[in-house]
Image: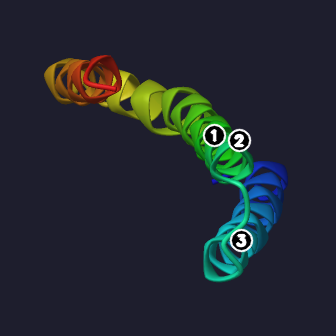
């Protein structure tokens, strides 16, 4: 993984971790439901951004390497698997 990508992913995940702790506190203190849902949506968006960064890293690093090594079928299968998982959301 590229060093810059790794740093960005780690920072984003730390932010998500804080958001989840905040969500737990909101539930514990019985905050307004709409506020909890809004915060939950923000967590989901942040995790989606992590997925996007990881996908970009995978495509630019691993898939290219697989293609150069004659492993096109493996690369295609991985991409299709990720695409199908994304469609299920």
Q: Nearer the viewer, residue 89 or 2?
A: 89
Q: Which residue is mark 2?
A: 38
Position of 72 with respect to 8 (left or right) is left
Callout 2: helix, strand or loop? helix
Q: Which mark is residue 26?
A: 3
- Residue 78, compared with residue 37, is above or below; it is above
Q: Is residue 44 left or right of residue 73?
A: right
Q: Are marks 2 and 1 in contact (CB under 8 Å)?
A: yes
Name which residue lies at 50% across and 37% down. Answer: 58
Q: Position of residue 88 (x, y in %)?
A: 25, 24
Query: Which of the two labelled residues, at mark 1 and mark 3, occupies the earlier sequence position?
Result: 3
Left or right: 1, with 71 as reference point: right
**Image location (x, y in percent) of residue 55:** 52, 33
Q: Percent position (x, y) of residue 70?
A: 24, 24
Task: Write the residue at 15% across / 20% down.
Answer: 73
Q: Quadrant of residue 46?
A: top right
Judging by the rendered image, the residue that carries numbered circle 1 is 41
């Amino acid at each position: 993984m590229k060093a810059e990508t790794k740093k960005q992913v780690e920072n984003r995940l730390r932010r998500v971790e804080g958001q989840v702790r905040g969500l737990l506190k909101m539930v514990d203190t019985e905050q307004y439901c709409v506020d909890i849902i809004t915060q939950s949506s923000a967590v989901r968006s942040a995790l989606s951004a992590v997925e996007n960064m990881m996908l970009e890293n995978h495509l630019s690093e691993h898939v290219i390497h697989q293609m150069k090594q004659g492993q096109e079928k493996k690369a295609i299968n991985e991409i299709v698997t990720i695409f199908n998982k994304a469609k299920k959301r």
